[in-house]
Amino acid sequence: MSKKTRFMAIILPLMVAAIGLTGFMAWPAASITVPTTPLDPTTIPKYTDQLVIPPSYVPTVVTDSEGNVSHQYTISMEQFTQQILPAGYPQTTVFGYRGLVQTPGGPVMFQNSPSATFEAVRDIPIKVNWVNNLTSQILAVDPTIMWADPNGMGMPSMPFLPYPPGYPLAQSPVPAVTHLHGGEDRSDSDGGPESWTTSTGLAGPTLTAANHTAPNTATFEYPNGQEPTTLWYHDHALGLTRINVLSGLAGFYLLRDPADSIAASLPSGEYEIPVAIQDRRFNDDGSLDFPSAGDNPDDHPYWIPEFFGNSIMVNGKLWPNLNVEPRQYRFRVLDGSNARFYTLSLSNGQSFTQIGSDGGYLPQPVTTTSLTIAPGERADLLIDFSGVAPGTEIIMNNSANAPYPNGDPVDPATTGQIMKFTVTSDPAVTPAALPATLNTIPTLTPDAPKRTLTLNEVMSAGGFPLAVLLDGQTYGAPITETPAVGSTEDWEIVNMTGDTHPIHLHLVQYQVLSRQAYDTAAYETDWTTLNGMPPFSTATVKIPIDTYLLGSPSPPDANEMGWKDTVQMHPGEVTRIRVRIAPQDATGAAPNVNTFPFDPTYGPGYVWHCHIVDHEDNEMMRPMAVIQSGKPILSLNSAAAFWASYADYTARKLSVPYTISNGAGGTANNIQVTGTINTMGVTLDTPLPYIAGDLAAASSLNLTLKYNVPIGVGSFRSTLNVSAEDTAGVSYTYP
């Protein structure tokens, strides 16, 4: 008997707009809204509020019968009001995470935007019940881009409704899913874009039954086996990340190692402070001011390519002050903005030291007077105030153009300032000496073919982006990034756009190799001649970059010499990264050898994307499936539904064509399709199971299913399961 395994890969949500049906949608009358006026940021007082230091969540400590310890949490997503603006201004309605935190008076429930901090311990796993209590959005959902669509409303057509109120079926309920950014986790706990829940009990197509522990709850597990570092958690719902994160769904996740020998030389306790930098805009009633008129309103009524706020929020307060003793502090800095980069410096010109980046300590401390950080990146910084006179006020400044690097300069009076440090009159404390070596970063050797990938924009006739793409492909195109577990690949990413993009890979920390200029005009001409104009729904034809390169490659900056999960990729350059599908501290990693403490081929798979979340929400994200030799990788895609004939129309039998694609895995044998319909009274007319036969790797087959659709039904959701066997007879189910 063959060993039977389950590989949760694809759940297909079928949202069929039944052409010609009556009663497709009925919109309630628009409610009366009170006009608001954008708040002038130059009138907002600065440095009147003290920096808020997020408290830490309190775990429930669980010890199993074998003595293994784990930490468990229940964290809910809530809507509430918060005093972000200085006292005297109205409060702001936000989203945030709510959970039990430790205070001097004991544990209490706490909610904030950004939210409380997880204090994780290496090799002690964490289980979190993420509970979604959000009932309706506070910002505009654009249903014309790829998005979760929990109600199956489909894409509206012109003329689009203005916001407010927008589309009620898009505004409520709120799909949300929490991603641990930078975590080495199995994909069913990765918080991928289609593993969302809603407060009403709806669930995304890739949320597995085992993780969907309650109607509005997703339970994820984090093994915490990687190096100590600064991670963060945030919402990742498909097409909604930009508004859910801007509304407040984000927080820190600090992973510590009891065996960390460097920590003894570093500031700790009250002298170690997480700092989340985020830009915002506000209205005079305190509400968040987020654009609800797109640059291309005939295509996307509300989506804009990048959101840039005119006010700087740090840990949930605008332009706060921090009173610092004359000693060294450790700041865990996060760029948590939608699109804004920050080039940080101190107004007194003093230097500071970076000791860590996304994936942990750098090889050596890096002393600098400025640092550019992109959305999603983290920097572990030491600032020494021991030689600064009491009463001195130091401004953390920002000088990064928006968009970066060739956009508009900052306003020195607003976005050019981040926060203030005021040095107290306490006795000065000399900092401990840092070790010359902080970390040993292994030298990786590629053992798989390199990948050449591109960053692309699709422009409108008016010169505004309609979508932003990876390798010219849409998010829903068949999977093309299928690295083998244990393998090491070089990815050459060619930026064909005018902006820098911070590219983030889920599951792994990777290494930056180099950046190099290339002949942009020649490469784009040849690439377009070969491929046509994007977007594509099939694999892109690759053009090697070698013959287009200019000059010599530049090595990574000193503060990029460690492990990274998010890297700045500049316009006019090819950025080379080395990606190993293995843990940071893996030994014996090789293609098809798994050294993770979990199976990375299990579950719905991972994604890689731009961390300008406005880009991520509109196609600049692609699936990534980790494979093992011989294992088939199936995906199921549907085209537009149609009435095949007038007889089909009167019989209400809707035809839906599907394509089953087999990615870079092995042959899929004995493919069968099963399915269920549990919405709107729709049933399947095609007998199931559908026997599809065998399918070789890198090939596809087509099938058509018919559905019985009652009169009055405009959209419905279907779940199809595809089962197959590999050449060894091992069974896989792709629900």
Image: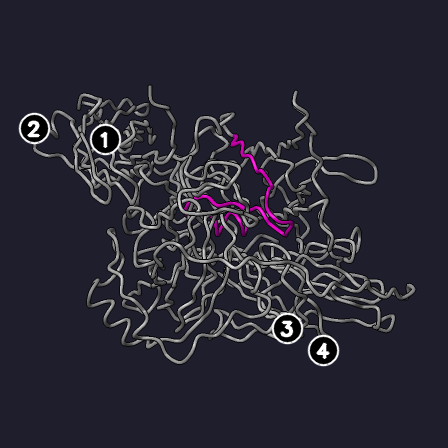
Q: Amino acid at mark 3?
A: Ser
Let me know if residue 66 appears in the view: yes
| Vertical placement of residue 209 versus 436, above or below | above
Find residue 730 and report its horizontal and vertical position in percent.
Answer: 32, 27
Q: Which residue is mark 4?
A: 349
Indicate the quadrant where residue 2 lies: top left
Query: Element under label 1?
Result: strand
Query: Which numbered disc covers residue 370?
Result: 3
Of tags 1 and 4, which is closer to the observer? 1
| Residue in front for this viewpoint, 176 or 31 | 176
Q: Which residue is mark 2?
A: 647
Mark 4–mark 2 distance (CA, rounded to whole Å): 78 Å
Q: Residue at x 24, y 37 (%)?
A: 667
Find residue 136 and report its horizontal and vertical position in percent.
Answer: 49, 39
Of tags 3 and 1, which is closer to the observer? 1
| Vertical placement of residue 627 versus 554, above or below | above
Q: Earlier in the sequence, mark 4 or mark 2?
A: 4
Mark 3–mark 4 distance (CA, rounded to whole Å): 9 Å
Q: Earlier in the sequence, mark 3 or mark 2?
A: 3
Q: Are marks 3 and 4 in contact (CB under 8 Å)?
A: no
Q: Which residues are magenta?
A: 217-246
Mark 3–mark 2 distance (CA, rounded to whole Å): 70 Å
Find residue 470 and report its horizontal and vertical position in percent.
Answer: 35, 57
Callout 2: 10 Å neighbours few (<14), some, many (20+)?
few
Query: Which numbered disc covers residue 669?
Result: 1
Q: On the picture, is 599 further left or further right than 261?
A: left
| Vertical placement of residue 567 versus 25, above or below | below
